[in-house]
Image (cartoon, rainbow, N blue to C red):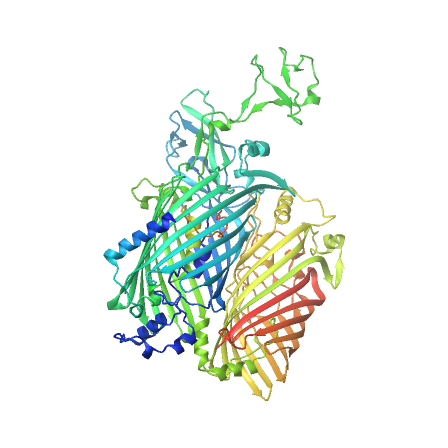
Amino acid sequence: MAVIKGDGVNGKSAFGRVKAVAGHFIAKPPEKLPKTPLPANASLQFLTAAALSLPGLSPAPALAVEEETGILYGYYEESNRHLYGVKSRFHPITVESLLVSSKIKLADRIKFAFNYFQDTWSGATPVATAPQSFGGNKEGHVISGATPFLQNNNVLFDRQMNPLIRDPASGQLVKDAQLVHTLSTASPEVRKQGDFKLGYEWDSVSLDAGGGISIEHDYESRFGNLGGRWDFNNKLTSLNLSLSYTNSDTRSILDHDATPYIWDTTHGFESYNATSTVSRLGKEGGNNILYGNRQDWGTVLGLTQVLNDSALLEGSVGYTRSTGYMANPYKTVETVFIDPDQTGKVLNGLAIGLLEKRPEERNQWTENLRYVQHIEALDASLHFDYRFSHDDWGVNAHTFEVDWIQPLGNGWSVTPKVRYYSQSAADFYTPYMVSNQAFRKNAVDANGRQIYVEADNPNNGKVYFRDGDFNLVDANGNLVDETVINPVNKTIPPDRNKLPAYYSSDHRLSGYGALSGGITLGKQFAKGVTLEIGAEYYTHSGSLKLGGSGEGSYADFNAYMVNALLKVDLSALSIASLGHGDHHHHHRHHGVHAPAGVMFDHMMNSAGDMMVGARYMYGTQSGDILHGSAIAGDAEIVNKGCSSDLCFTAPSGMNMNMIMVDIMYAPTDWLTLMLMPQFVDMNMTTRKLNGMPVPSFDQQSLIDHHTLHEHTTGGVGDTGMYAMFKLFDQSGHHMHATLGFSAPTGDVHVKFRDTQRLEAGFQHYGMQLGSGTWDFKPSLTYTGTADDFSWGAQVNGTVRMEKANESGFTFGDMIQSTAWGAYNVLDWLSASVRGVYTVQGAVKGAYNGTYNQLGPVDYTSSYGGRYWDAGFGINVSVPHGSLQGNNLSFEWLQPVSDDVNGYQLRREGALSATWSYAF
Amino acid sequence: MKLVRTATIVVIGLCACACSPVAPWQRGKLAKPQMALEPYPLQNTFIGHIYNSREASGAVGSTGGGGCGCN
């Protein structure tokens, strides 16, 4: 199970404590430096000044920025696995990540940092490994392409326990030496993590404490940490110590589609719960659930040493002790049971997928060395990292990494990187298992008589036998009525004690090596804004393992990852703002911000101005289903909610989260350009309707798939690009027009995971991540101010410019009008009220692929409507201090009246929050 | 404390052979952004998350989070 460093976002700036704030620079200009040869280079002079301007002098890396906010988008995708002639119907796994990180100073010596991390995983990964002859990826049935097949599989072995496969050419049985992964996929899953750190700094000592939580539908992790740093030896040496604790709960749904291959059918609940001390199986609302808990205690002791004026060395040791359930509930170990009583050269075996079993304890140690050398001739730096990690599971791992950071001038830098990783396999890793016992044996009594039990009640303690005439008799030899008893053979399950104590086929515990290379390109713009983009290509291969004997090539894969980061150095902005005090004042005076839910509300004032911002929107729906403005009962929905069909289900809740990044730039004073990438995620719960018609077997499977657990989607949404034109701006009145487009960068192919070997098809229209079409988005905005009052109005529209997107539909066009008023309660605080009226059309067209229509959300006519909302907002502007220019707004939008098309879930409200920084 | 003492001795030993005294005003190069021990902290969080969900030796000793890594 993966663990990431929560503090990685803040950087390991052991010495990064130069107070690079304006006041210090002003107070200690370079000419007041001690009488030593001054560096010729101006920027070096600046940095030296920075290094000297500390309350306590501190060495490198001084530019660990004190106040910074950044947003990163990352994407990861793996290559297809080699399935040896079988065509998988699954796409390989992809991960989309969004990371928002901020650190600010609450007071001179008090620092606060917080991070928000969200990622969405979708696609297929290996769930098991088996010889090719097992047919773990089975083609056929309802779905085209291979699906997992790991249960009750009859397989053949020779006397030496080699798997056998029938040679298609000769028809003879030959040894099957080829292993292959079995792939399975999951519906998209979203993980969200929030963490914080609060720190206090003395001159040579700092202490910090932090904590956080990571939530996904089947795993929740809570963690806390304490850390300290002590600088000594004239701040040439620094000692770091940290302690962390994590407590994580697993609550995995072993659902219908998973049970055929991971359900422990050999034993069932009771037996599993009896043998596992750290996890438990149970039932909850029709779902089979695996519960587990683990705890991790970790500590790191590190020492950083300045070696000379151009080299640094850091050494650290780390230790983690983990206890509890550390297995992966979705991985299975393919296990072949072979009855040793068989005669002949060819043995029959039965292959079953068992839930994997890992030790309940793990002790990991790591030794880490990092060396940084400045290369004078190129003003570059060379980073060399080596890590050795070892544990009592038998996994020994070496990691080497070399980075070369080359500044190129004008704020540009390029960093090529090479990384090599090698690990040995865990002691209990096995691609698959062979157990020398029958999977199921008929039970006999002491006299060798076959025992029978009642088929409908096998555990009632009553046993039966056959007499000499093959009549059924009870334990006392009395004849019984066979038609009443319905006898079946009593069977004995396999003996778990004949299996190894621990076993896992998770390929991440196998022996392999990984080589990766990457490059990061950075550009620092004026005013403390930095853009960094990175790419890395990763090759995982058994043959790359140090010393050889890695896993076979069937497990090899490649992957790539790309990321883009925008960060704003708030302290640099404060420095920049010192010379432009009136400029900011102008902003504040003019830029009385519109309520948080209003977009395109203001322009930049003068040529060269920039603004960065982040916008968060949350919308929630739950409760009644509306038809028009009236509440619709279940009977009405069943009969009328699904066009000419009958409805089975209806939504019971839906939540949408959207994070947008605003980047605004004014090339001239009458034009502002705006780029707005988005990141969205949604979740939805569905219920069965009372009085729904009797479903077919397949329909029942799909209904269970929809209603038994929440569905989530998430990832990059559509990207907006706009131009705002100033129409007039005088004596407190301002008007501008916005013309722009929304590019279809959001995915409109999001599908459910297949269930019961049925193709579950597209998720509902409203769960797709974008519109899929190029959309034209014009708006007209008027704002006015007088004394402590401000007001405004806006009309905006969305016109779909294509007839259908790649998935065959378009959302309806939309027009919205809004008007608001606000009052400055205090110098830094204003409150607003707003009215909004929105009209949106229904979805046009329909999905062009498999799509199972079970409820109103699956019909295009149940989208769009006419809506009235009232908004209540507050706006906070930081008028002075180091965070001057920052603006925070919140608005709650309360639905007043809904008139929906078709049958839709009631809207409960929407929250908007915006942060912006103009400079 | 024993660890701290050992570490201190190691550092002093290291310094004796490798370190030259670096006066505060000679630390300009060390203060350059490319000399930071962790020059790309946010990217490394993202990439580290991927490594940790694909490799068996995680970030030993440090704070949790990061999720199940069950995929």
Q: Is residue A471 left or right of residue A736?
A: right
Q: Foreground: A519 or A829? A: A829
Q: Foreground: A741 or A540? A: A540
**Number of numbered tags placed on the structure image:** 0
Instruction: Answer above or below: position of B18 versus A140.
Output: below
Horizontal and vertical percent for residue A46? Answer: 34, 74
Q: Residue furthest bottom?
A: A731
Res. A38 in view = yes
Horizontal and vertical percent for residue A713? Answer: 55, 56
Q: Quadrant of residue A280?
A: top right
Q: Is residue A500 left or right of residue A842?
A: left
Q: Quadrant of residue A815?
A: bottom right
Q: Residue furthest top?
A: A468
Instruction: Answer above or below: position of A612 versus A274.
Output: below
Q: Foreground: B40 or A166? A: B40
Instruction: Answer above or below: position of B38 versus A544.
Output: below
Horizontal and vertical percent for residue A575? Answer: 43, 76
Q: Foreground: A515 or A630? A: A515
Res. A79 in view = no
Q: Is residue A651 left or right of residue A77?
A: right
Instruction: Answer above or below: position of A637 versus A505.
Output: below
Residue at image point 48% right, 52% down: B66
Horizontal and vertical percent for residue A394? Answer: 38, 39
